């Protein structure tokens, strides 16, 4: 005779008995999370389970037959995601949410229009799950922002503009999913960017047709003059098995996958590099609202244009010229021969110059707004200024540089930025000091007194000049995550503190990069990325800088 084993124990002076009631079989992988539906009081109990088999199941107790049945199944099919590590019902029981290895949330809502068991996948919050190392605004008006992280992805965030509704920001594309931790990026134009990672290669990407369509619909951005170009672009991109490069997907590839699904005879025919993958790694679809995680992972990649080889160690920083025709890159370096800055022609993908000046890693690069100068700062505690050759726009010979005596900084220089009129630039260092540099008697020298804070400065950015106040707005990021806003006036050269951003909205770890948004309508918005895995957009009222 079979008997169920009972476990008895005491809790708060009460004797309780635990006995096995049912074994729920339905998952094919380890189960990492379960959650009761707390809203289902007085009714048949419901239990939600999440598994590594990429599914979540809602179990409901059948009172009539005294058994548990799987009422609904949710999850992902295909893609490169792992399973779920946890799950939960909403307080109302009308939504369920799961979270996975890559830090993403997956949300489903019950659609009563097609029955109680019909669940729809919905958009939810998304973001990086590793340190956000760098970001860049869309160079044509700051209509979107591209972020990059040690979670090995680049993500594109844009505003979702809807009639009679508040504009909100969402992730609408994941252009690059890599196999190395990402380090730096630079937008070349609105639809092309370059990125660097913990590898010796610089990679360049261009937007596919699917992104043009998505961006146009979600952010309400129309570009009629691009119609001819768009028609010739690939539909999207995909990453082959065991590959790191995003390969373009054209209509012929889709037709080839469809044909192979209908007849195995086509296996012997000449097809694309992806023809052997089943199911098809890319599914074209018109996206009318911010995509969910499964779509972001699989259908929003950008095709890779080219790889640029030339550095001997991991890529550390990069910057693009204002017209996007030049890309400057630098890598980690412990010797002068590795600290060279390489200039690339982004149209031919060829190296056009190699700039020698520093002895250790170049930490940041910055072109002036007019493209006339290229500024670099380094771990060797110096900065170098290169000026464009009037006879050859692709050459930047060294104009001037500092040494350890003339630079004034006593520790590593982490960041630099040009003022909007290119008359001055600012350098920020681990020695807690900011210096503004300008031309005096045909020499670049420090202007007035430096600004010294109480901790190391890791990022700096200068906004447009305020005509009425005759001063510049400077954003400063600190090692502790603090953000300070100052104004700097050049006659006389003085600093004035405007605001210290409240700790409740500033990062809690090191600020990696800050950049003012280049949009006239919202020019006092500051983008901030940090080691705490976050990217933030802070908005300041203009009257704040005149008080």
Image (tube, rainbow, N blue to C red):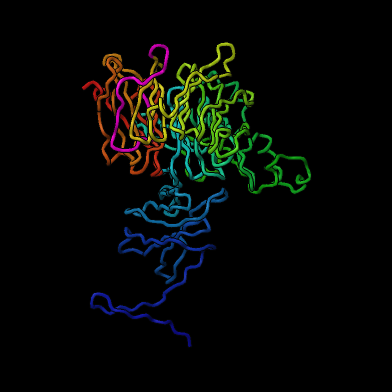
User: Residue 257 at what x, y percent from top left?
Assistant: 68, 42
Tell me the residue at 34%/19% (across/down).
Answer: 447
Q: Is residue 482 above or below residue 40?
A: above
Outermost residue toward the front?
405
Tell me the residue at 39%/29% (across/down).
Answer: 515
Tell me the residue at 36%/31% (across/down).
Answer: 167
Q: Which of the 4 image quadrants contains residue 290? A: top left
Residue 194 visible somewhere in the drawing: no
Between 264 and 504, which is closer to the camera in this rendering? 504
- The reply to whether the magenta stretch includes residue 445 is yes
Image quarter where the C terminus lies is top left
User: Residue 54 at what x, y percent from top left?
Assistant: 52, 55
Give the residues drawn in magenta, as a range.
Answer: 440-462
User: Residue 17 at what x, y percent from top left?
Assistant: 33, 79
Between 29 and 361, which is closer to the camera in this rendering? 361
- The reply to whether the magenta stretch includes residue 341 is no
């Amino acid at each position: 005779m079979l008997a169920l084993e009972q476990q008895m124990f005491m809790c708060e002076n009460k004797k309780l008995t635990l006995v096995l009631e049912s074994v729920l079989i339905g998952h094919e992988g380890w189960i990492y999370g379960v959650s009761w539906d707390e809203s289902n009081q007085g009714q048949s109990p419901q239990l939600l389970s999440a598994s590594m088999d990429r599914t979540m199941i809602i179990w409901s107790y059948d009172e009539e037959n005294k058994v548990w049945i799987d009422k609904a199944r949710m999850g992902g099919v295909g893609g490169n995601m792992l399973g779920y590590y946890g799950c939960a019902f909403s307080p109302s029981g009308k939504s369920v949410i799961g979270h996975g290895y890559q830090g993403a949330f997956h949300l489903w809502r019950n659609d009563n229009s097609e029955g109680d068991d019909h669940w729809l996948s919905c958009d939810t919050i998304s973001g990086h799950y590793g340190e956000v190392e760098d970001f860049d605004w869309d160079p044509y008006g700051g209509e979107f922002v591209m972020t990059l992280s040690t979670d090995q992805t680049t993500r594109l965030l844009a505003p979702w503009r809807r009639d009679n509704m508040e504009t909100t920001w969402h992730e609408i594309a994941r252009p690059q999913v890599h196999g190395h931790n990402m380090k730096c990026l630079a937008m070349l134009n609105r639809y092309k960017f370059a990125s660097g990672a913990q590898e010796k290669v610089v990679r360049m990407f261009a937007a596919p047709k699917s992104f043009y369509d998505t961006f146009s619909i979600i952010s309400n951005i129309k570009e009629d003059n691009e119609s001819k170009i768009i028609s010739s672009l690939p539909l999207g991109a995909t990453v082959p098995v065991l590959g790191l490069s995003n390969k373009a997907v054209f209509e012929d590839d889709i037709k080839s996958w469809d044909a192979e699904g209908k007849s195995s005879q086509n296996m012997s025919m000449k097809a694309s590099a992806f023809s052997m993958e089943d199911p098809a790694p890319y599914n074209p679809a018109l996206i009318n609202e911010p995509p969910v995680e499964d779509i972001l992972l699989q259908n929003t990649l950008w095709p890779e244009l080219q790889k640029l080889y030339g550095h001997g160690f991991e890529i550390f920083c990069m910057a693009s010229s204002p017209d996007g025709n030049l890309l400057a890159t630098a890598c980690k370096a412990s010797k002068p021969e590795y600290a060279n800055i390489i200039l690339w022609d982004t149209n031919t993908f060829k190296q056009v110059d190699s700039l020698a000046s520093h002895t250790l890693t170049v930490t940041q690069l910055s072109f002036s707004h007019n493209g006339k100068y290229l500024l670099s700062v380094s771990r060797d505690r110096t900065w170098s200024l290169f000026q464009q050759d009037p006879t050859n726009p692709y050459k930047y010979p060294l104009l001037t540089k500092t040494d350890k005596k003339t630079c004034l900084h006593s520790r590593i220089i982490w960041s630099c930025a040009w003022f909007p009129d290119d008359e001055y630039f600012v350098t920020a260092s681990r020695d807690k000091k900011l210096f503004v540099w300008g031309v005096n008697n045909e020499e670049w020298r420090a202007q007035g007194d430096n600004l010294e804070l109480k901790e190391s400065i890791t990022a700096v950015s200068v906004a447009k000049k305020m005509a009425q106040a005759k001063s510049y707005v400077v954003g400063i990021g600190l090692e502790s995550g603090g953000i300070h806003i100052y104004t700097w006036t050049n006659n006389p050269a003085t600093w004035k503190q405007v605001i210290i951003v409240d700790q409740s909205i500033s990062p809690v770890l090191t600020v990696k990069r800050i950049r003012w948004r280049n949009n006239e309508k919202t020019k006092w918005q500051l983008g901030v990325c940090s080691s705490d895995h976050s990217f933030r957009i802070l908005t300041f009222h203009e009257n704040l800088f005149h008080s």
